[in-house]
Amino acid sequence: MSEEKEKKDEEVKKDTSEEKEKAPEKDKTSDEKKEDKASEEKTDKEDKKPDKKKDKKKEDPRDEKIKSLQDQVLRQMAEFDNFRKRTEKEKSSMYDAGASDVIAKVLPVIDNFERGLADVKEDTEDAFQKGMLAIYKQLLHGLDELGVKEIEAEGKKFDPNFHNAVMHVDDADKGEQEVVEVLQKGYTYHDKVVRYAMVKVAN
């Protein structure tokens, strides 16, 4: 009996020691499983996260291209607008310069008409004189429509921007630097002087 009891005790001890040896292994396996599971979840999350760097790399070239094209278009539009304005200004200035030259050539003809018609009355019955007066008035009317204006001088204060003083007189009845006589009429074209008025100035 004692021998059988001893055998049973040894078997129980053996089983207990085996269970103890296996228990850590089970625990270790459980921990490892937890770690593996956590690692897998982390990997899944990382995989699910959008790769911003890759997206950014893919979008940047297109955005830069769009910005570059927009800048080019804006520059070209600005250059074209400047070119258009400059061209219009050049055309206008060329036209004005050409018209001013023609008007300057016509003014001596006006002077000669005025000298020739100085003693002719408006109500003259002479056919030739009537014809000359009609031509003179028609010429003045045409110049007026073009924007040619006579510079006001007599009785006005001398203005170097419009008057050319060639004579000076002392006259107590006249104001200081007053234009007392116009020796040659002056004209402007679109507010620009074509010919200065040649005047006599008092005081």
Image (cartoon, rainbow, N blue to C red):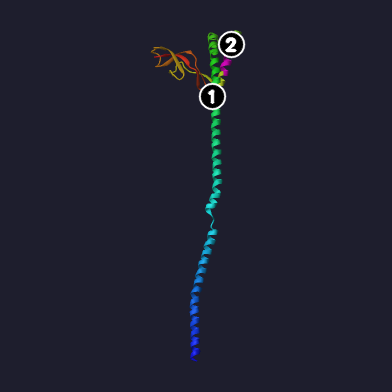
Magenta residues, start to end: 132-142
Which residue does the image show at 52% across and 62% down from the upper left? 42
Residue neighbourhood size for the residue with mark 1, other residues' Cα within 10 Å, grouped as few (<14), some (14–19), many (≥20)? few
Any mark on residue 116, and which? none
Confirm whether the magenta stretch covers residue 195. no
Q: Residue 92 appears at what percent x and percent y?
A: 55, 25
Label 1 is placed on what type of residue?
Ser
Of 92 and 124, which appears nearest the observer?
92
The residue that label 1 is drawn on is 93
Q: Is residue 47 left or right of residue 175?
A: right
1 or 2: tag closer to the N-terminus: 1
Q: Position of residue 158 (x, y in %)?
A: 43, 18
The answer, for residue 64, to whether it is visible in the render is: yes
Work out whether residue 125 can be spotted: no
**SS class, disc 2:** helix
Give the amino acid type for the residue marked by disc 2 in the picture.
Met
Identify which residue is drawn at 54% across, 30% down.
85
- In this view, the residue in front, 18 or 156, is 18
Name the one closer to the observer, 22 or 131: 22
Tag on residue 132? 2
Magenta segment main secondary structure: helix
Q: Is residue 87 above or below residue 60?
A: above
Q: Residue furthest right?
A: 127
**Which mark is nearer the camera, 1 or 2?**
1
